[in-house]
Image (cartoon, grey):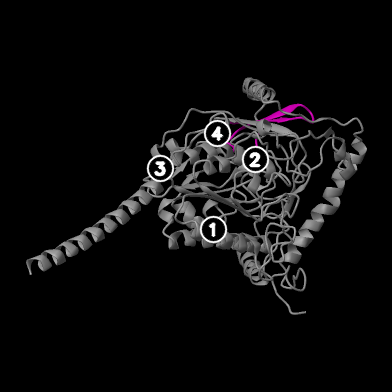
Amino acid sequence: MKYHFLSNNKLFLSIIFIVFMVFMSCKHDRTQDDSSSAIKPNILFILVDDLGMHDLSITGSDYYETPNIDSLAAKSFRFTQGYAGSRVCSPSRATIMTGKFTARHGITNWIGERSGKDWRVIKRYDKLLPADYIHNLQVEDTTIAEAFQANGYTTFFAGKWHLGGEGYYPENNGFDINIGGWDKGSPVGGYFSPFKNPKLKDSVSGEHLSLRLANETADFLTAHKKEPFFAFLSFYAVHGPIQTSEDKWAKYRLKAKSQGLKDHGFAMERKLPIRMTQDNPVYAGLVETMDEAVGVVLNQLKILGLDKNTIVVFTSDNGGVASGDSFSTTNLPLRGGKGYQWEGGIREPYFIYVPGKKLKNGTSDYPVTGADFYPTLLDYAQIPLLPNQHKDGISLKPIIEAGINPESRPLYWHYPHYGNQGGDPSSIIREGQWKLIHYYEDDTDELYDLELDPGEQQNVAEKFPQTVKTMRQKLMNWLDAVGAKFPVKDSEFDPLKRKEYDQNKIDKLLPNLEKERMEMLSKDFKPNRDWWGSKVTND
């Protein structure tokens, strides 16, 4: 009897011990996972194409509606003087990927644009032949994705790449998964399925591209929620061709009418007309859908409980398209837009959300660029910095967490090309309050005091000649040091043909743009039968 009691008791104690050990093991594993997550925060990088500084409600638009991005921005650290790496897409994206300014990494124009004598083919009759440039990310560079991949992160890319052709796609540059990224810089099939994208299988006819990319990203988050990830959501929106659904067009047409339409929507900049109003209902609908797509991804983070350990970055690759392309928006009070050398071409929304951090201040006016994302995100992930790689970026963590601004530093932009949007071949240096633009057509400079004149209306180069001399010398020294390439004079330049070309923009293009603007705001506007494919028909 005694033996039976002891035997049962021993069995009971053994069971209790095993249960206890399993419990402790599970607790240990969960603690380990939590600790690992704390050491390795997830990264979600959201890059919008061609989004202007004032294309969001939170940055000043009373026409576009962006509640999801506004909500993200409200809890993020906002850099009010955040800059893209370039005035056009490919160079700016390369700066994010490499942590280098454009003249250093060599991709100084959007990949695919002509240069040298080939520029004559398009018959712009410009004074200079644009410089040649590199057409893909260089293999010797360690991209930000490769840095995270090497440190145990699963890496994901969805959307626009435009950083090289076959052999230079996202999967060749550190991304484990690539959805939709290839050599094209715009949505070849438009914004509604079929997309005509070899890296993105068509699913449902009429599906919106932005929402598809968001859903792909949400699926990735779900599948990899138990491991650290670096997810890069790179929208094709809001690049042209701008398209939207009929209901969104109708909504924003009525909104534009209710706000009161201005008699004229355009004015002449130096070489092209430029949009002066935010009243394009098609563009507004495209912006809203992009915002909805951002909401899909942010909501999935919350559903999965990943929002507490995911750093979110939101920015754009260049200014809003005010001239050229689709003449979509205005960046006022900033001057210019995509392709231009002024602030409207390079100033961007620049938000960094760090969960669980009590921020010293919610905003900073310290000038930052796309090159700073690389070291900042490594710093937050506790990955050793790579100063020989991200040579032109600094970690912004001290600013975000302690309000400590680094010493003033020079920022550089180099664009030895002509843009489709009216910009000129030029290079820029920004240091402190001063911004100097050097033009290669006539070897002249503009100097702006951005503290007093953020809209760049007063060129004060004659008033501060010593500042011009000092900044120009610093700019040229830096360009020489990094091996920058420069445009050259075109021996076949014909000033009479150029004058005729310019006059045509005033006499024909400007009035046509005004006409198209009013047609788009007319109740009878209809782009085609199925609204760019957003209406699925059976015939």
N-terminal of the two: label 3 or label 1?
Answer: 1
N-terminal of the two: label 1 or label 2?
Answer: 2
Gap between marks 1 and 2, in whole Å?
24 Å
Please tell me whether mark 1 sits on a helix, a strand or a loop.
Answer: helix
Gap between marks 1 and 4, in whole Å?
29 Å
Label 3 CA crowd tier, 10 Å (few <14, some 14–19, many 20+)? few
- The residue indicated by pointer 3 is 361
Please tell me whether mark 4 sits on a helix, a strand or a loop.
Answer: loop
Q: Is residue 176 left or right of residue 127?
A: left
- The residue indicated by pointer 2 is 94
Label 1 or label 2, whichever lies nearer to me, is 1
Q: Please state the horizontal and vertical placement of residue 424, each as a whole percent of the image.
A: 75, 37
> CB under 8 Å between callouts 2 and 4?
no
Q: Relative to 498, say whether 211 is above or below.
A: below
The range drawn in magenta is 434-458
Q: Is residue 101 left or right of residue 166?
A: left
- The residue indicated by pointer 4 is 393
Label 2 or label 3, whichever lies nearer to me, is 2
Label 3 or label 1, whichever lies nearer to me, is 1
Q: Is residue 499 left or right of residue 270?
A: right
N-terminal of the two: label 2 or label 4?
Answer: 2
